[in-house]
Amino acid sequence: MSIKVEGLSKIYGQQKAVDSISFQASPGKILGFLGPNGAGKSTTMRMLTGYLKPTSGKSILGGFDSQLQSLEMRRILGYLPENTPLYTDMYVREFLTFVANTYQLSQTELKVREVIERVGLGEEQHKKISMLSKGYKQRVGLAQAIIHDPQLLILDEPTTGLDPNQLTDIRELIKNLGRDKTVVLSTHIMQEVEALCEQVVIINKGKIVADSLLVELKNQHKTDSLEELFRLLTV
């Protein structure tokens, strides 16, 4: 299942937050979606997932139009927003059980136990979400995004707040997920892109300024430094 974006735009008054962008993400190649602050990354993620209505254009996720077939699309999509919305008065295991029931999953208890182990929440599972550190809240957000084993994953700044040890674990998990799923990863951390992404889309001032395999982009601009490449394309 792939993600196809065609002429997607979002205009606020006179400002074009996202300006007629098109790109495609396919299974087995994690796509890094990069851009400076205010470039339109999170706006694009929210439009892809159906949480924000585009001014024009469309996004097709797994064959479903994100605006016209939102319910069908969400069944096959996992989404981790930039600011993860969690029910902080709930306990970790309670919240994930609630999410599993929302998706009407069978063997709910097993699915919850598996995802808790997968994202490393074992020692925190009986705590209230409000009591967790930012990094562990991020893990809960990732757990709710993958509990239903979606074929498409959109992760907006997924490693925000993680310490170095947690970073390694979560990056390895994302890498494993990307082997057979379609993953779009929005981030501003260049090391993360180097570690995880094969394809790169760079957005600046609402427009796409690069869309290529990472290795091809480096060869094209004759540099091994993604940071240098990023600066060059986003001035």
Image (cartoon, rainbow, N blue to C red):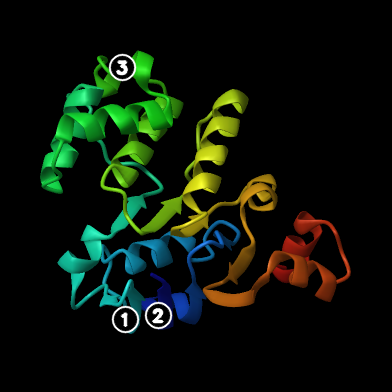
Element at label 1: loop
Give the image quarter of residue 204: bottom right
* Quarter in which the N terminus is drawn: bottom left
Location of residue 7 in the rendering, given as x and y in whole percent from the top left corner = 43, 86
Amino acid at circle 3: Met
Q: Is residue 175 above or below residue 229?
A: above
Cβ atoms under marks 2 and 3 closer than 8 Å: no
Residue 151 vs residue 18, the one in the foreground? 151
Which numbered disc covers residue 131?
3
Gap between marks 3 and 1 measured at Cα: 39 Å
Q: Is residue 14 above or below residue 110?
A: below
Q: Is residue 160 above or below residue 127?
A: below
Horizontal side of residue 12 vs 15, given as left or right = left
Cβ atoms under marks 3 and 1 closer than 8 Å: no
Amino acid at circle 2: Ser
State which tag comes first along the sequence, 3 or 1: 1
The residue mark sitting in front, 3 or 1, is 3
Cβ atoms under marks 2 and 1 closer than 8 Å: yes
Residue 41 vs residue 163, the one in the foreground? 163
Amino acid at circle 1: Thr
Q: Residue at x 17, y 26 (%)?
A: 94
Give the image quarter of residue 35: bottom right
Within-10-Å neighbours for mark 1: few <14, some 14–19, many 20+:
some
Which numbered disc covers residue 55?
1
Within-10-Å neighbours for mark 2: few <14, some 14–19, many 20+:
many
Gap between marks 2 and 3 measured at Cα: 39 Å
Gap between marks 2 and 1 measured at Cα: 6 Å
Q: Residue at x 26, y 77 (%)?
A: 65
Element at label 3: helix
